[in-house]
Image (tube, rainbow, N blue to C red):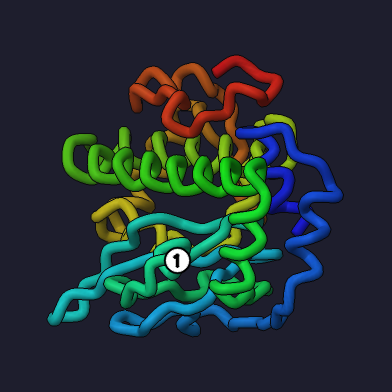
């Protein structure tokens, strides 16, 4: 739960004691292997998941097998808050890497945040940020070029990881293959590979087996028109 606390503390002033109440709620810790479903489409959701480690993804798959990844979910992310209204899942959530999850019953979770205004506000902000990320994804896939899409997503992931760690760094630990980035960006794997090559050739990034090093942050921002205001990271100690 430390990563979740690190995330929501950017929105409201909250202390460890308040989070201890969430940690003490009845829960199950589960592990999913890469590719395994966490939430299946059509499933009635009656629990909240918190990602403690690993990456997951939210997606829709068309009848012909094509997949659109809507967003990546990182350590500290909490879903599905739609369970608070007993909705059926209209999407799939699956593990992108090995994922460790904390599963909390909706009723227990709702009772706790109902009693605590600070917690309720924190999770309201979690929902606001996720909606903003999904809006940005529509713009990214619908209007940006391939180079703009890749640069924009790299900067978004970099800032979201900074939110967990509390500081910005110029390296993105990227544990997912390019095929998943392609499904998130509406591009072919070949197109994503060529785009990475272009960004490397122009000196903006470098790649390693572990991830991506950002060499020219401002150039990436300029070519992708990236502004991080939609992530609501005002409390982080770096220039937005």
Residue visible at 32% across and 39% down?
136
Quarter of the image where one finds residue 69: bottom left
Instruction: Give SS at disc 1.
Output: helix
Q: Which residue occupies 46% across, 61% down?
A: 81
The quarter in which the C terminus is drawn is top right
Q: Position of residue 222 (x, y in %)?
A: 38, 18
Any part of residue 164 in sight: yes
Compare residues 184 and 13 and report the one nearer the observer.
Answer: 13
Residue 99 visible, this orientation: no
Does residue 61 sit above or below 158 in this rendering?
below
Residue pictured at 42% horizontal, 44% vertical: 196
In the picture provided, is 24 more to the left or to the right than 82?
right
On-image quarter of the N terminus = bottom right
User: From the viewer's perspective, is 97 left or right of 27?
Assistant: left
Relative image position of residue 161 (x, y in whole percent):
63, 43
Q: Which residue is mark 1?
A: 84
């Amino acid at each position: 739960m430390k990563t979740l606390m690190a995330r929501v503390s950017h929105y409201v002033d909250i202390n460890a004691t308040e989070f201890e109440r969430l940690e003490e709620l009845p829960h199950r810790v589960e592990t999913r292997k890469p590719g395994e479903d966490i939430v299946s489409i059509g499933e009635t959701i009656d629990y909240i998941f918190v990602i403690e480690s690993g990456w997951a993804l939210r997606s829709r798959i068309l009848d012909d097998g094509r997949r659109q990844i809507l967003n990546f979910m990182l350590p500290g992310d909490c879903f599905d808050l739609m369970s608070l209204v007993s909705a059926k899942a209209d999407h799939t959530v699956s593990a992108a890497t090995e994922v460790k999850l904390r599963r909390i019953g909706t009723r227990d979770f709702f009772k706790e945040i109902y009693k605590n205004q600070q917690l309720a506000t924190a999770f309201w902000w979690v929902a606001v940020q996720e909606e903003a990320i999904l809006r940005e994804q529509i713009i990214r896939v619908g209007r940006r070029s391939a180079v703009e899409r890749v640069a924009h997503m790299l900067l978004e992931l970099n800032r979201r990881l900074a939110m967990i760690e509390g500081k910005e760094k110029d390296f993105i630990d990227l544990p997912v293959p390019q095929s998943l980035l392609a499904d998130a960006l509406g591009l072919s794997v070949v197109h994503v590979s060529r785009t990475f090559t272009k960004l490397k050739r122009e000196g903006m990034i470098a790649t390693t087996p572990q991830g991506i090093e950002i060499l020219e942050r401002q150039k990436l921002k300029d070519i992708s028109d990236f502004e991080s205001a939609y992530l609501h990271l005002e409390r982080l100690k770096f220039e937005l």
